[in-house]
Image (cartoon, grey):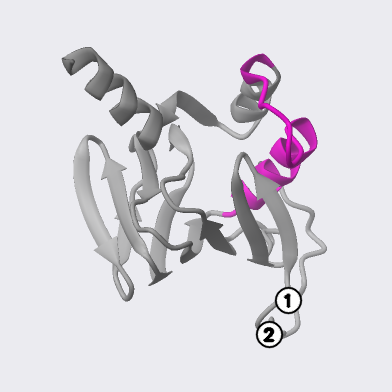
Amino acid sequence: MPVPANARRDAFIMEEGDGRPIHVIGEDVTIKISSRDTGGAFAVFEGRTRPLQGPPLHLHRDQDEWWYVVEGEYLFEVDGQEIYASAGATVFAPRGSRHTFQNIGAAPGHTITTVVPGGLDLFFEEVETAAPRGSVPNVAKMLPIFEKYNLELLGPPLAARRSAAASAAD
């Protein structure tokens, strides 16, 4: 996704609590460095994930994604590989990989995420508009946004998939 050429060119600092807060399908995200700030080179955001929550299974055709776990216990799934990560761990999902994660702890989790190149923050802004806090996301309304940003929605979050698998096994 093209980013305006008027990207910020001066050094800056984002203190704790600074940034642009966004609500993305059940997760609170704060954009710390927007792709608008970097001419599209990358974006950095902070995520807060409630216990047993996480995004749906998806892929980014254009972005590598890197998470640093600040607090909490997470289960990541990258191309079918399960990766358990807790505070201090770093997890990488290359572009084109099928991935998701879930906070598997009893307390809220906290991550710092970088995507290269940027653009995922712009996707988040559009998703928040299409599915504001408290609304039930409409998949038909969301798919064109995924397509616009060269992302693919592949399935439900880990919690829903595990629940369905447990029900099927009974």
Name the residue located 70 percent from the left edge and 77 percent from the top edge. Answer: 17
In the rendered image, residue 120 lying in the magenta stretch gets the answer: yes
* Outermost residue toward the front in this view: 170
Percent position (x, y) of residue 127? 70, 37
Percent position (x, y) of residue 54? 46, 44
Name the residue located 65 percent from the left edge and 82 percent from the top edge. Answer: 16
Residue 135 appears in the rendering = yes
Residue 61 appears in the rendering = no
Q: What residue type is labelled 2?
A: Glu
Quarter of the image with the N terminus is: top right
Which numbered marker is on residue 15?
Answer: 2
Q: In which quarter of the image is residue 29?
A: bottom right
Q: What element carries label 1?
A: loop
Q: Is mark 2 on a helix, strand or loop?
A: loop
Question: Does residue 95 lie above or below 156 as drawn?
Answer: below
Percent position (x, y) of residue 53? 46, 45
Crowdedness near tag 2: few (<14), some (14–19) or many (≥20) residues, C-alpha within 10 Å: few
Percent position (x, y) of residue 165? 25, 21
Which numbered marker is on residue 10?
Answer: none
Residue toward you, 106 or 113: 106
Magenta-drawn segment? 118-140
Residue under numbered circle 1: 18
Q: How far apart are marks 1 and 2 (CA)?
A: 5 Å
Question: Does residue 140 lie above or below 104 as drawn?
Answer: above
Crowdedness near tag 1: few (<14), some (14–19) or many (≥20) residues, C-alpha within 10 Å: few
Q: Do the residues labelled 1 and 2 touch (CB within 8 Å)?
A: yes
Q: Quadrant of residue 61?
A: top left
Quarter of the image with the C terminus is: top left
